Amino acid sequence: DLAAPLLSQPKVKIRVRGQLPLVQPIMKREDFKNIEDDCSSLYQTKSGMENATFYEHLRTLDPTEGLRMATADKMNNIVLMAVDLIKFKRVRELVKASNPNHINGDMEVKTISMDDFIHQPGRSMYQVYDFVFNDLLSEETKITRSKTYEQSYLQQRESHHEMNNHITYGKFGDTAALIEYLRGEPVFGPPLTKIEALLDEILYEESVGME
C-alpha cells in the first residue's frame, strides 16, 4: 500500500528496451494484485501438493512455475529496492539544489547491482569498504578483507548448491531460457523490466554524475 503510489507515479525517467527515456509508471496497484493471484494459483493447488511447503513447491514444480513462485516471494524486496532508488535520487536532487556549487552536494550514494555482487563478490566488497571507510582503512586492508569475503562467499555458495537443487539455486543449463521466460511473462515481465531499467538509469547517473 505504501509502495504502490510512489511506483505508479515515480517522477523518474527510465529507458525501457531502447526506447527514449520517459516518465512512466513502474508498478500499479493491479500489478501487485496480479502477482498475488498468480502465486495463489500455484501454491497448494496441484494434486498431491495440498499440504506441501513453499520449499517443497520449489523442488517439485515445473521450473517456470517454481521461478514465478520464487519471484513472487522476493517481490517485496525487489519493490523496496525500487522505492529506495527513487527516494535516494530525490534526496540527492534536493541536496544538490541546496548546494549548487558542489558537484554532488553533500551526499553520496553508492549503488551496486546484485549481479555484480554475485559474479564479482571481491570487487563489490572492495567498493563497499572504499565507499564506507575511504581513507580510514588502508588500501592493503581493504584488498585483504575483500579477498577474505570473496573466499567465504564462494565457499558458502558452493555448499548451498550441493545441498539444494531447486530452481533458485545455482546456474542450470536452462538459466538463460528461464530469464527470457520471466522477461516475457505477462505478470512479472513488465514490472521487473521497468525496475531493471530504473536500476540501470541510477547506475548510469552515478557513473557520470548527476546532470
Image (cartoon, rainbow, N blue to C red):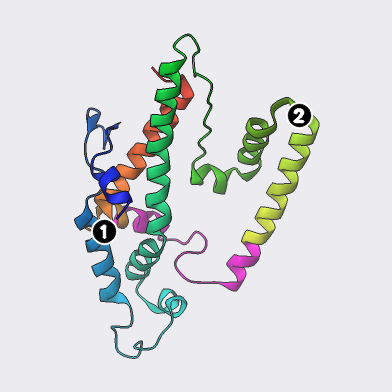
Quadrant of the image occupied by residue 100: top left
Q: Which residue is mark 2?
A: 136
- Residue drawn at x 33%, y 38% is 197
Q: Which residues are magenta?
A: 158-181
In the figure, 141 relative to 69: above or below? above
Place of residue 69 in the rendered image (x, y in percent of width and height, measured from the top left): 36, 68
* SS at badge 2: helix
In the figure, 18 relative to 114: above or below? above
Tell me the quarter of the image containing the C terminus: top left
Q: Which residue is mark 1?
A: 32
* SS at badge 1: helix
**Residue 43 magenta-highlighted:** no
- Residue drawn at x 32%, y 50% is 3
Determine the CA span between mark 1 and mark 2: 44 Å
Q: Amino acid at mark 2?
A: Leu
Ranked by sequence position, the earlier of labels 1 and 2 is 1
Q: In this rendering, would 143 be left or right of 205?
A: right
